[in-house]
């Protein structure tokens, strides 16, 4: 679904958060201070977006490996196209941010996960940021610090970022050495078997993770944290599979048409001769019958 024109809901909430942070009992902050705050928050958001994409890349290739560096790192490279070529990560981000109705859980869950990651600080990605954005980050150099800073300023935390923090938290439990290495986040640094172990922790309601979230989530979520984790674990694998083998990567939402043949269709041999407008055997009534008699 394309973004609506003008100020969308997320942008509105972000700006309201910035406005609230820039307001004090004495009135508005000076223009220079306000501009500096906006620059910092924008830089933090951009950096966390990069961190989230990197983590979800690691999840996408866990479901559909390919010839990419992420698949090679987990030890399962394949010659045919995989999730990275199928735009699975953008699909996951859209599905999580727009489809799953858990906005009330995002901020407290992000706060809890940031606190949990503080024990093993993860460097904040700066690749792709401008010099001014990097300078705007100042002393905020770790992912947990960035999340805390955004929450302090009433910034919305998209569910995709919460999921990334969740995956990286369990990745560090499975392999503490994944705190550093190639890529921007821990989860993509795991082997295929280690990723499977991490997902099993989510599906099994890992006690450490449940205890961490239980102290932050509002009721009635506290009594169902295990169920929430099991749901997320299953949904992530399902969404990654659906996104990979769907027409998402070549679908133009403006014209509602396909710009090419989806890679998933090619790999599976789906509809080899083009789109089928129903099978002849199932069009109309059997043998042109108009009624059934006993």
Image (tube, rainbow, N blue to C red):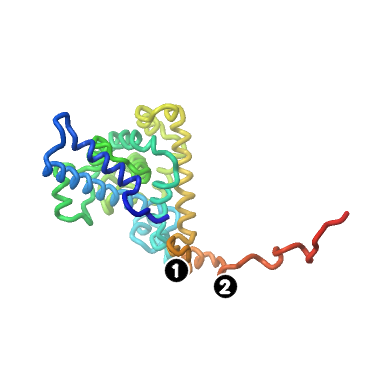
Quadrant hosting residue 69: bottom left
Which residue is rendered at x = 36% and y = 41% of the image? Answer: 166
What is the crowding at mark 2: few (fewer than 14 residues within 10 Å), some, or many (at least 20)?
Answer: few
Quadrant hosting residue 82: bottom left
Horizontally, is 168 left or right of 44 in the view?
right
Which quadrant does the N terminus fall into?
bottom left
What is the crowding at mark 1: few (fewer than 14 residues within 10 Å), some, or many (at least 20)?
Answer: few
Residue 179, percent from left and from top: 27, 44
Q: Which residue is mark 2?
A: 273
Q: Is residue 121 visible?
A: no
| Residue 129 drawn above or below residue 271 | above
Which quadrant does the C terminus fall into?
bottom right
| Residue 140 drawn above or below residue 129 | above
| Camera-nearest residue between 112 and 277 | 277
Which residue is rendered at x = 36% and y = 38% of the image? Answer: 106
Horizontally, is 140 left or right of 104 in the view?
left
Q: Is residue 159 visible?
A: yes
Q: Specify the farthest residue to the right.
A: 294
């Amino acid at each position: 679904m394309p973004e609506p024109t003008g100020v969308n809901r997320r942008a509105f909430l972000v700006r309201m958060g910035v406005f609230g942070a820039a307001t004090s009992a004495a009135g508005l902050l000076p223009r220079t201070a306000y501009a500096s705050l906006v620059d910092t928050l924008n830089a933090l958001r951009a950096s966390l977006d990069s961190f989230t994409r990197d983590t979800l890349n690691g999840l996408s290739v866990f479901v559909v490996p390919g010839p990419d560096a992420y698949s090679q790192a987990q030890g399962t490279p394949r010659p045919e196209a995989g999730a990275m070529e199928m735009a699975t990560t953008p699909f996951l981000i859209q599905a999580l941010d727009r489809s799953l109705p858990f906005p009330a859980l995002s901020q407290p869950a992000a706060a809890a996960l940031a606190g949990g990651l503080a024990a093993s600080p993860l460097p904040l990605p700066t690749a792709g940021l401008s010099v001014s954005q990097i300078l705007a980050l100042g002393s905020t150099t770790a992912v947990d610090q960035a999340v805390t800073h955004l929450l302090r300023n009433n910034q919305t935390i998209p569910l995709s970022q919460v999921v990334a923090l969740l995956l990286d938290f369990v990745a560090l439990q499975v392999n503490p050495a994944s705190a550093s290495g190639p890529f921007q986040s821990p989860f993509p640094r795991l082997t295929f078997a280690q990723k499977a172990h991490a997902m099993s922790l989510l599906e099994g309601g890992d006690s450490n993770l449940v205890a961490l979230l239980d102290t932050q989530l509002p009721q009635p979520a506290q009594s169902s944290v295990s169920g929430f984790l099991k749901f997320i674990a299953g949904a992530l694998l399902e969404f990654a599979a659906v996104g990979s083998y769907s027409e998402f990567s070549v679908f133009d939402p403006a014209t509602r048409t396909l710009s090419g043949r989806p890679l998933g269709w090619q790999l599976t041999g789906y509809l080899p001769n083009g789109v089928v407008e129903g099978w002849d055997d199932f069009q109309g009534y059997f043998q042109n019958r108009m009624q059934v008699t006993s």
